[in-house]
Amino acid sequence: MLDDDPGVPDYLEPTMKMLNCAYPNGVLPEDYWGLLAVLHTEMSFRTLAHALSIVTGKTKVETYNDAAGFTQADVQDPTSIDRAMERLKACGYDEWLESD
């Protein structure tokens, strides 16, 4: 579904594979900020924005602005971070971190 997007560059494929596994139906609004919090420290703003725009349906501009201005205060529901981490770990997050 989402990984067939022609706008996905090769370097983003491992990330999209993990995100599509973790969020096969896309990211729900209540999970968005938790996911952004988890990935924020691991990805550049531009790469994060591109990936999030694909799995959320938001524009790259919206997701870039969210990533660039992100603070932990943006996470209204701290349990959303735990939910995101749980989903991502079940889909290869640790291996993804170790990959190049």
Image (spheres, helix red, strand yellow):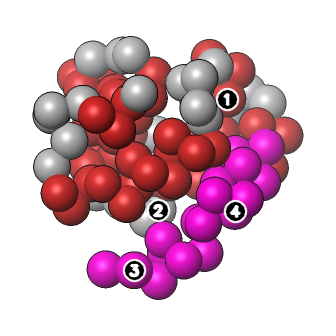
Amino acid at circle 1: Asp
Mark nearer the N terminus (4 vs 3): 4
| Residue 40 spot, x, y in % from top left | 46, 53
**In-front residue for pair 66/18:** 18
| Label 2 crowd bin: few (<14), some (14–19), many (20+), radius 10 Å | few
**Cα distance between the residues tagged 1 and 3:** 25 Å
User: Would you say the residues marked 2 and 4 are in contact, meaning their CB atoms lie under 8 Å apart?
Assistant: no
Left or right of residue 31: residue 82:
right
Q: Looking at the rendered structure, which numbered label has been put on residue 99?
A: 3
Amino acid at circle 4: Lys
Mark nearer the N terminus (1 vs 2): 1
Q: Secondary structure at mark 3?
A: loop
Amino acid at circle 2: Thr
Mark nearer the N terminus (2 vs 3): 2
| Residue 94 spot, x, y in % from top left | 60, 75
Q: Residue at x 49, y 75 (%)?
A: 97
User: Would you say the residues marked 1 and 3 are in contact, meaning their CB atoms lie under 8 Å apart?
Assistant: no
Is residue 91 highlighted in magenta? yes
For label 4, the residue is 89
For label 1, the residue is 31
Q: Secondary structure at mark 4?
A: helix
Q: Give, as a single range, the part of the protein colored magenta.
A: 83-100
Residue 83 to residue 38: above or below: above
| Residue 36 spot, x, y in % from top left | 52, 42
Residue 51 to residue 74: above or below: below
Mark 1 vs mark 4: in front? 4
Mark 2 vs mark 4: in front? 4
Q: Looking at the rendered structure, which numbered label has been put on residue 41?
A: 2
Q: Secondary structure at mark 2?
A: loop
